[in-house]
Image (tube, coloured by chain):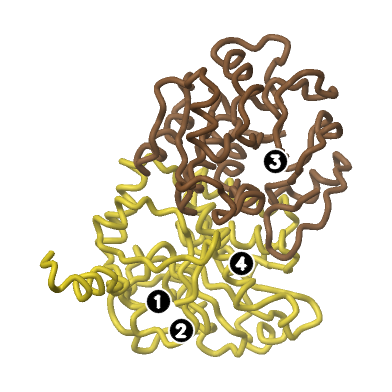
Chain colours: A yellow, B brown
Amino acid sequence: MDKMNHSSAEAEAETIEPLRYLSKGEVAAIETELLRDYRFGQQQLIEIWGQACAIAITKAYPLSSLAKKQPTVLVICGPDQNGSIGLVCARHLRMFEYEPTIYHPKRSSQSLHQDFTVQCEKMDIPFLSYLPTEVQLINDAYNLVIDAMLGPEADCANIKEPYSGILVTLKQIKTPIVSVDVPSGWDVEETSQDGINPEVLISLTAPKKCAASFSGKHFLAGRFLPYDIQKKYELNLPEYPGTDCLIEL
Amino acid sequence: MCGRSDEADASSLLQPGPRRKAYPLSSLAKKQPTVLVICGPDQNGSIGLVCARHLRMFEYEPTIYHPKRSSQSLHQDFTVQCEKMDIPFLSYLPTEVQLINDAYNLVIDAMLGPEADCANIKEPYSGILVTLKQIKTPIVSVDVPSGWDVEETSQDGINPEVLISLTAPKKCAASFSGKHFLAGRFLPYDIQKKYELNLPEYPGTDCLIEL
């Protein structure tokens, strides 16, 4: 560094690079590396993410802030990883004394996902057998709806039942929606056109491109990513406060 | 009680919050926030590995001594995760006590868990325990102080400053006189009732509580 420009070079070195928003491909690549090279287990990652989601929800909607008499929360879980994260999140919400109810219409055949389901069942968390289409029933029963249906790997152009139907319902409810990682139905890389409109988005590990156009409350959760991966993908993650596993963006 | 999947769960869930609470970064006396984490061959050791990784995320500088590695792939995974976080692994532990006193702010004892046979402690752990009885650096024990009989008052075992009981305290902890944390807030209510654990109320969303 040129010694004469010492102070400006110093200022340059301290400039914070902007947070990166990831593409679908980058999300998949990072996860592959974590599992293959860093030897994280899938169960381990899902547990970390699910717990971080639950903590983010308690920050955005503390028990005392919930309007209804009971701290009810509806957690809608998809068939894949996003759904499993929802299951873990529901379990932690139960430990935090919320009253989660799970709607998990299509269960994965993977034993890992089934384990998460059993863990929730053994916590006495009720599982709905169907989701009311009458919007007022949802508005009346739940303080929050956690959208853990579709993750960044989902094909948003090709959403099958029952999720397409559920998304229609979610566009009509008044209950605030919290989306896990990406709002279900949104294109991961595009601005949302007419998708659901969550109040809160909890990005896991790093935000996805579509989050750049998200106008609600945005959390980044899941503080475990090895520094080497952060550098390799130039994530420029913000500094988490203290030992918190989440930060509001 | 705890099956295979619980191990990963418990390990993933264990946040070294107690260590940060007991020894915040700013409180550490040495210039660098160095921490020595001594890991045994079984679950207690794996918990230590996960703990070291999180300490690294919290900007402590852990160093791991993990003399005997388990052959279980799960335990090996935890080792790789630490190596990929650039956490140094010592190839041997100095027997000279002053070297440890000078180098580290804390020693985390993650050698032997409640399943260990305290009457039959093999090398290298018996030797390490001898060293630990002489160091001045504060010791934090994971779940049970290594070498203690799980159910008895300790006679002449190591003397940690902090004990972090996992899920529920063990009998020997009743005679522990240092700072005692309970950590790991995930235990299903049914198990709590079945074993009449009478766990205290964790504050807010904390996963640990000081007893």
Rounded to the nearest angstrom, the CA distance separating label 4 from label 2 is 18 Å
Q: Chain of mark 3?
A: B
The residue singled out by tag 1 in the image is A185
In the picture, measured across the screen, residue B177 lies left or right of residue B110, that is right
Disc 4 marks which amino acid? Tyr
In the picture, measured across the screen, residue B116 lies left or right of residue A1, that is right
The residue singled out by tag 4 in the image is A103
Residue at x 68%, y 47% (from the top left corner): B184
Asked if the residue under mark 2 is in contact with the one under mark 1, i.e. CB atoms within 8 Å, the reply is: yes
Rounded to the nearest angstrom, the CA distance separating label 3 from label 4 is 37 Å
| Helix, strand or loop status at disc 4 | strand
Q: Nearer the viewer, mark 3 or mark 4?
A: 3
| Helix, strand or loop status at disc 1 | loop
What number is the disc on residue A196? 2
The mark nearer the N terminus, 1 or 2, is 1
Q: Where is the C terminus of chain A found, in terms of image quarters?
A: bottom left
Asked if the residue under mark 3 is in contact with the one under mark 1, i.e. CB atoms within 8 Å, the reply is: no
The residue singled out by tag 3 in the image is B164
Q: Chain of mark 2?
A: A
Above or below, comparing residue A168 to residue A73 in the picture = below
Q: Nearer the viewer, mark 2 or mark 3?
A: 3
Rounded to the nearest angstrom, the CA distance separating label 4 from label 1 is 17 Å
The answer to whether marks 4 and 2 sit on the same chain is yes
Residue at x 85%, y 24% (from the top left corner): B153
